[in-house]
Structures are given as structure tokens and as C-alpha cells.
């Protein structure tokens, strides 16, 4: 046969064989594993990938900034127990997404950041490719695992590894590096199909040892003043019924961490939310369920925990979490569903919780709630936090299935305490880092993943970090109502520049800003609310209509305090000039 004839035969063969490529294999691998939503920002080298994914039935939500897309993916992971997927371009897009990946890891949310990258040969020789960066190396210390796929035939395995790493054990963020060349790599379609992996049992149950369960129950039974603390790991676990049964059977007061609110309603007879300082100080045995003894719990020691000796029981999937801050006398390592069910089975005829303790906690709580009540009914103009939050508290009570997103300083701390939550995973907020900027990303993912209405309660500063995504909310016509607590600045709007120059002080913004006008630019509903009554009307109208709405709630600029409730963490100079 002549050389020309051989070539023609080979071409004919190739034509007959069905082919696939990197683009299609990534899409097929995602779909095979039930990852049907992508949050991202398009550009080289992933523009066509986004289009093709959309055409193939994946929901592709295009954001204005990768950080917001990343936060959306991270909370999608929290809400669904499947890794949220964020897709970015190389170097700058990747870096923008990286904050969210680190955030996901810190908060124990499963997420996969997929970034396109430039050519390895050029990156490794540092020859200056378009958006050149050694992304894999940079991602590694900031996430739970990081992988790169170089060959189309490895896409299936690469994604399987990413999914397992994200959701198994303690969940976290995973980086998946996809160089531009991979997308166009062609291979035989049949072989491609075979190379895909449907991950079986991605987060296997981790059964606690029977001894650890017995030890924990013995310690708990010995307590005179027991306390259960529920953390966002317990909310993530989706073992809602078992947790409720366990808490109720034990009769022990429980304290929900911010994002664990609603696992049992905040109005539950055993809820000690409004008696927080009392129960931390006076308890003698504390059982942590999916909550770490980090700064949010004052590391389990010091003034807020009082002088009385305490014993800690901790349930967590991560063995290394035990003894991280104080001694854990009864570590229970396993997934929360398995652990709590094992506790329930071992409880037998559980004695009633000590009545004097339960009574004392309830009395303190009822007293605090009663003291707060009149402040929440005030109709002051300009509004203060309590007047505005009193209104929102009632609205959430009447609409318990709405998801509340919350960020800010005073806006966060006061809303967390005042707005009762009635169902699991209905309150999402700044999390472990106390981060500003989660607002719009969280709102978008909540609406997309759950189909429920979303209420965002945002400080004016907090909102600014993700504010441009109101266009995204309008574009996808999501049922999101944003309320901005506008006090003209960070903590307060009253700071003055003591230098005598005309610059404003670092913590204040333009006075009398009208954030409501922002959403009007994109066809959403904007409302300026100056009193609790106006606020109430506007929020109810937004929640009824489901239309994207932004309410500028005009607050007294002097109403807040420096750093909200965590002013004690804020170093302040005693030498500063007045
Ligand atoms: P919070 O901020 O609400 O106090 P943290 O984020 O500090 O909560 O703690 C959550 C804990 O829950 C982490 O230590 C994490 O390992 C753990 N966790 C997450 N998911 C599970 C699960 N399914 N089973 C057991 N523990 C879990
Ligand atoms: N940047 C990031 C990413 N996270 C942060 N937490 C901060 C900066 C610092 N910071 C806070 O801790 S709260 C806050 C900032 C900038 C804003 C508080 O102002 P606000 O809320 O308007 O959102 P209030 O109601 O005025 O207190
Ligand atoms: Mg403010």
C-alpha cells in the first residue's frame, strides 16, 4: 500500500470512531456524580466549557467576581452535603476564587474549585504565558487537597478524587487544576466513557467505638449541670431527627452556635441561647456536637467559662480535633449521625436532667427574653438595631422556611441573638473567620439550591464586599430580599478624622447613601425604609412577590458599638492622640 493510501485509511477510521474531548469528559464526569450546578466567572480557557456545560443541562451561574461565586459554591456544599463547584479562569480568577476555597476548608464545607490554567511547559520554565501562575502549588497549603489532570483519560479519576477528598471525613475545599490544553484533548468516546468514575459512598459512615459511647454517656449521666453545644457540623450532618431526639430524651439545656440555630427551634423549652453566659459559666459537663472549641467558644477556658471545673465530651469526625484547646475527657470520633444514634441506643432509661439546673437556666433565659421584648417593639426614627430587628424577627417567625443570610458587625451580632430560627440550616453567616463578603454569594446559592425565599440582613459595609452581585440576583430573577442596615459606616457612622484634613475617618461612608438605587439599575425593586413599619411592609412585600428587592434601612449612625460584640478582641492604643 502506498503511504497516501495508509493515511486515507487512518483518516477514515478516525471518522468512523466516535470521539470525545476534555470539555465533554469533564461535563460527563460532573453529571455522572450529580454535580449539576456550577458557580463561576467565564474567560480563557473555560468560556466554551461554561457554554457546553449549560447546553448539556448543568446549571451555570455566572457571577461578577469569583470570590462571590466561590462563597456560593462553599455554602452550596454546606446546604447539600455535595461539593459545591466553582469554576474560574487562570491566575487572577483563580486567586479570586482561592479566598473562598480557604474559607470552605476553614469552615469544613465541601467545595471544589476548578480553575483553568496555562501551559505547564511555559509555567514551569516561567516564560511568561498568558495569566501564568503555578496555581497548584499556591492552592495546596490553603485547601484540603489539590490535584492536576494532564490527560483526558484521567479526568474521571481526577474528579472522583476531588469529590472524595471534599466530602469524606472532615469536609473541606479541594482544588482541581485543569490546564488549557486538556479541554481540547481528543480521545475515543467509548474509552472516554469507560474512564469516568461514579463515586460510590463518597462519605462513608464513620461508626464510633462502643467504648467511646459508653464513656460519653457515663460522663453525661454524672453531671449536675450538663450542657449540649450544637455546632454547624451538626447542622451539616443532616441528622436532624436523631439530634432532636437525643437532646429531648436527655432533657439537657442546649446552646446552638450561630449556624446550628434551628436544629431545634430557638423557642424550644431546652434552648439556652438567651442564657449563654450563664450556661457557659455554670455548667459542669459540656457535650460538643459538631462544634470546635475555637475563639467562638473562647477556647473552652478563661473568664467566660467561669471558675468551676468542667468536663468536656466532644463528638467530631476529625480525631485531631480532640484536646485541641482543653482536655476532652470523652472523645467520640465518628460521623454525627452514627454517633448520636449510638448514644440514643445506649441511653436506656435515661434519668431526668437535674431539675434545679434546668429550672435555673430556663428562668435566666425567660428573664433575658422578657427584658429584651420592649426594646424590640420600639418604633424609633431613625431606627436603631433593636427596632429594625424586632420587625425582622416577626417576619422570620411567620416565614420559618426562608433562609436568613447575615453579615456585618453589630448587624451580625444583634441579629444572631434576636432573630429566632425554627428549622435546620436556615441561618448562614460569616462563619469561623467572621468574614465579610459572603452575603450575595450565599444568598444566590441558597435560592438556587433550595428554591426557598432568602432574606439577607447586611451591614452597609458587609454588603459592599459583594454588592455588585445584585445584578446576578436580578439576572437570574432569584427570590432574594436584601435589607441593608445603613448606619453610614463600619460599626458606626459617627467617627471623625482627627487630623484636620478633609478626608473622612476610615470607618465612615457617604452619609445618607441610597443603596436601594443600586438594584433599580438592574430592574429589581428598591425601597428606602426609614421606620420599623416601613421596613416591615417592604420586607413582607418582597417575600410575597419573590422579586429581587433591596431595602435601604436607615439606621441611626450612632446606634452601633465598635466591633459589635467582639470589641474585646480589638487592640486599641492607649497612647493615641485625641
Ligand atoms: P461552629 O462554628 O458552629 O462552632 P465548627 O465549624 O467550629 O462549628 O465545628 C464544626 C465541626 O464539625 C468540625 O470540627 C468538623 O470536623 C465537624 N463535622 C463536620 N461534619 C461532621 C460530621 N458529618 N460528623 C461529625 N463531625 C462533623
Ligand atoms: N474584611 C473582611 C474580609 N472581613 C472582615 N471581618 C473585615 C474586613 C473587618 N470587619 C469586621 O470584622 S466587621 C466589618 C469589617 C469591615 C464591617 C462592619 O460594618 P457593617 O456592620 O456596616 O457591616 P455594622 O452594623 O455597622 O456594625
Ligand atoms: Mg454599618
Image (cartoon, rainbow, N blue to C red):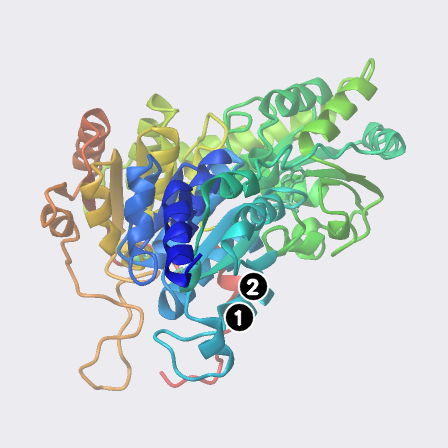
Please name whichever residue, 19 or 32, is drawn nearer the observer in this view of the structure. 19
Mark 2 or mark 1: which is in front?
1
In the displayed image of the protein, which residue is found farthest to the top?
349
**Residue 487 % position (x, y):** 25, 56
Classify residue 294 by image quadrant. Answer: bottom right
- Residue in view at x 18 percent, y 28 percent: 541
Which element type, helix, strand or loop, lies under badge 1? helix
Please name whichever residue, 545 or 16, is drawn nearer the observer in this view of the structure. 16
Q: Is residue 80 visible?
A: yes
Residue 400 got which mark?
A: none
- Residue in view at x 62 percent, y 48 percent: 165
Q: How many marks?
A: 2
Q: Is residue 21 above or below residue 536?
A: below
- Of the four image quadrants, the one with ligand 2 is bottom left
- How far apart marks 2 and 1 lie (CA) works out to 8 Å
Q: Would residue 187 appear left or right of 62 to someone viewing this image?
A: right
**Residue 127 % position (x, y):** 42, 84
- Residue in view at x 36 percent, y 51 percent: 69
Please name whichever residue, 118 or 481, is drawn nearer the observer in this view of the structure. 118
Name the residue carrying label 2: 142
**Residue 378 % position (x, y):** 28, 37
Which element type, helix, strand or loop, lies under badge 2? helix
Label 2 residue near ligand 2, CB within 8 Å:
no
Please name whichever residue, 519 or 114, is drawn nearer the observer in this view of the structure. 114
**Residue 450 % position (x, y):** 39, 30
Are the residues at dot 2 and dot 1 in contact (C-beta closer than 8 Å)? yes
Residue 138 got which mark?
A: 1
Amino acid at each position: 500500500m502506498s503511504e497516501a493510501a495508509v493515511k486515507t485509511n487512518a483518516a477514515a477510521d478516525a471518522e468512523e470512531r466516535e470521539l470525545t474531548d476534555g470539555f465533554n469528559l469533564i461535563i460527563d464526569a460532573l453529571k455522572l456524580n450529580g454535580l449539576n450546578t456550577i458557580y463561576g466567572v467565564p474567560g480563557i480557557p473555560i468560556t466554551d466549557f461554561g457554554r457546553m456545560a449549560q447546553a448539556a443541562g448543568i446549571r451555570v451561574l455566572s457571577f461578577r467576581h469569583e470570590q462571590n461565586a466561590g462563597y456560593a459554591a462553599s455554602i452550596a456544599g454546606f446546604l447539600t452535603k455535595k461539593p459545591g463547584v466553582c469554576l474560574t479562569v487562570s491566575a487572577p480568577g483563580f486567586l479570586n476564587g482561592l479566598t473562598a476555597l480557604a474559607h470552605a476548608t476553614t469552615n469544613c464545607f465541601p467545595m471544589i474549585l476548578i480553575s483553568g490554567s496555562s501551559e505547564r511547559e511555559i509555567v514551569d520554565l516561567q516564560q511568561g504565558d498568558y495569566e501564568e501562575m503555578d496555581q497548584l502549588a499556591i492552592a495546596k497549603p490553603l485547601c484540603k487537597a489539590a490535584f492536576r489532570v494532564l490527560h483526558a483519560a484521567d479526568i474521571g479519576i481526577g474528579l472522583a478524587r476531588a469529590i472524595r477528598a471534599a466530602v469524606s471525613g472532615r469536609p473541606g475545599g479541594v482544588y482541581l487544576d485543569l490546564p488549557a490544553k486538556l479541554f481540547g484533548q481528543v480521545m475515543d468516546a467509548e474509552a472516554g466513557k469507560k474512564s469516568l468514575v461514579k463515586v460510590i459512598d463518597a462519605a462513608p459512615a464513620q461508626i464510633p467505638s462502643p467504648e467511646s459511647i459508653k464513656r460519653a454517656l457515663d460522663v453525661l449521666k454524672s453531671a449536675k449541670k450538663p450542657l449540649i453545644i450544637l455546632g454547624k457540623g451538626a447542622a451539616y450532618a443532616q441528622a436532624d431527627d436523631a439530634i432532636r431526639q437525643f437532646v429531648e430524651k436527655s432533657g439537657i439545656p442546649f446552646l446552638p452556635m450561630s449556624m446550628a440555630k434551628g436544629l431545634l427551634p430557638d423557642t424550644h423549652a431546652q434552648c439556652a441561647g438567651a442564657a449563654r453566659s450563664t450556661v457557659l459559666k455554670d455548667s459542669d459537663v459540656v457535650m460538643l456536637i459538631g462544634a470546635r472549641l475555637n475563639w467562638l467558644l473562647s477556647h473552652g477556658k478563661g473568664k467566660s467559662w467561669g471558675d468551676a471545673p468542667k468536663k468536656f465530651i466532644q463528638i467530631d469526625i476529625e480525631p485531631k480535633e480532640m484536646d485541641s484547646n482543653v482536655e476532652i475527657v470523652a472523645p467520640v470520633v465518628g460521623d454525627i449521625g452514627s454517633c448520636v444514634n449510638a448514644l440514643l441506643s445506649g441511653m436506656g432509661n435515661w434519668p431526668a436532667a437535674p431539675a434545679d439546673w434546668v429550672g435555673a437556666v430556663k428562668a435566666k433565659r425567660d428573664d433575658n427574653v422578657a427584658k429584651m421584648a420592649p426594646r424590640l417593639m420600639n418604633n424609633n426614627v431613625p431606627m436603631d438595631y433593636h427596632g429594625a430587628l424586632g420587625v425582622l424577627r416577626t417576619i422570620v417567625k411567620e416565614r420559618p422556611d426562608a433562609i436568613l443570610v447575615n453579615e456585618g458587625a453589630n448587624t451580625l451580632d444583634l441579629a444572631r441573638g434576636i432573630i429566632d430560627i425554627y428549622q435546620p440550616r436556615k441561618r448562614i453567616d460569616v462563619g469561623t473567620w467572621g468574614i465579610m463578603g459572603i452575603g450575595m454569594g450565599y444568598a444566590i446559592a441558597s435560592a438556587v439550591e433550595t428554591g426557598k425565599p432568602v432574606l439577607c440582613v447586611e451591614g452597609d459595609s458587609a454588603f459592599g464586599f459583594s454588592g455588585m452581585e445584585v445584578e446576578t440576583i436580578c439576572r437570574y430573577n432569584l427570590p432574594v430580599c436584601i435589607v441593608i442596615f445603613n448606619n453610614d459606616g463600619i460599626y458606626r457612622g459617627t467617627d471623625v478624622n482627627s487630623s484636620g484634613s478633609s478626608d473622612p475617618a476610615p470607618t465612615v461612608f457617604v452619609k445618607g447613601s441610597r443603596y436601594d438605587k443600586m438594584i433599580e439599575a438592574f430592574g429589581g425593586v428598591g425601597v428606602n425604609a426609614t421606620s420599623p413599619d416601613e421596613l416591615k411592609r417592604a420586607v413582607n412585600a418582597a417575600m410575597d412577590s419573590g422579586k429581587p428587592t433591596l431595602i435601604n434601612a436607615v439606621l441611626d449612625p450612632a446606634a452601633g458599638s465598635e466591633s459589635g460584640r467582639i470589641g474585646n478582641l480589638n487592640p486599641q492604643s492607649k497612647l493615641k492622640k485625641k
